[in-house]
Amino acid sequence: WEQGPYEQSDYKPEMRKHITSRGLKVRSKSELLIAEKLYAHNIPFHYEQVLHFGTTTLIPDFTIRRNDGKMFIWEHEGMTNVQEYLDWQNQKGRLYASKGIVPWDNLIVTYDNEEGMIDLRIIESEIQNKLIV
């Protein structure tokens, strides 16, 4: 699944400046760290996969297929000090919920703090508690 073809977003590819240990280009250092943690746990994922739900299109940071086949969406919100960005993320959360993608089931949302720092203990906890079966 992970190596198979998928529709990846073509939105501002020049913004993907960070390169993972497997050669994947991502937009932020936080996404880079999340990808590396997923690699370390052998969890397959697609980065910025375009998902079509009828007339609605969503592009999560990571689409993950757990070992038992269950799909998860992982959004990492990095610009927590930019209100316009947070407003869009809230709207995106409502769109996900309208499609049955919700935090208590199949949606993971993590955050950088106001200084742009990520806590890898939280990333590890999400992986251990939701993605490893």
Image (cartoon, rainbow, N blue to C red):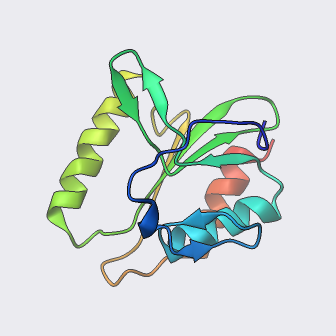
Point out residue 31 in the picture as x, y percentages from the top left corner: 54, 66
Which residue is located at x 62 percent, y 72 percent? 33
Q: Which image quarter: residue 23?
A: bottom right
User: In this view of the protein, which residue sits in the foreground, 40 or 1?
Assistant: 1
Q: Is residue 111 visible?
A: no
Answer whether residue 24 is visible to the viewer in this image.
Answer: yes
Q: Position of residue 37 (x, y in %)?
A: 71, 66
| Residue at (45, 24) in percent of width and height | 52
Q: Position of residue 112 (x, y in %)?
A: 41, 72
* Residue at the image point whose x is 63% and y is 73% from the top: 19
Residue 47, image x, y percentages: 59, 51
Say which quadrant the N terminus sits in. top right
Residue 25 vs 86, above or below: the answer is: below
Q: Is 14 displayed left or right of 106 in the figure?
A: left
Q: Quadrant of residue 24?
A: bottom right
Looking at this view, name the residue that lies furthest to the top: 54
> Going by the image, does 105 lie left or right of 131?
left
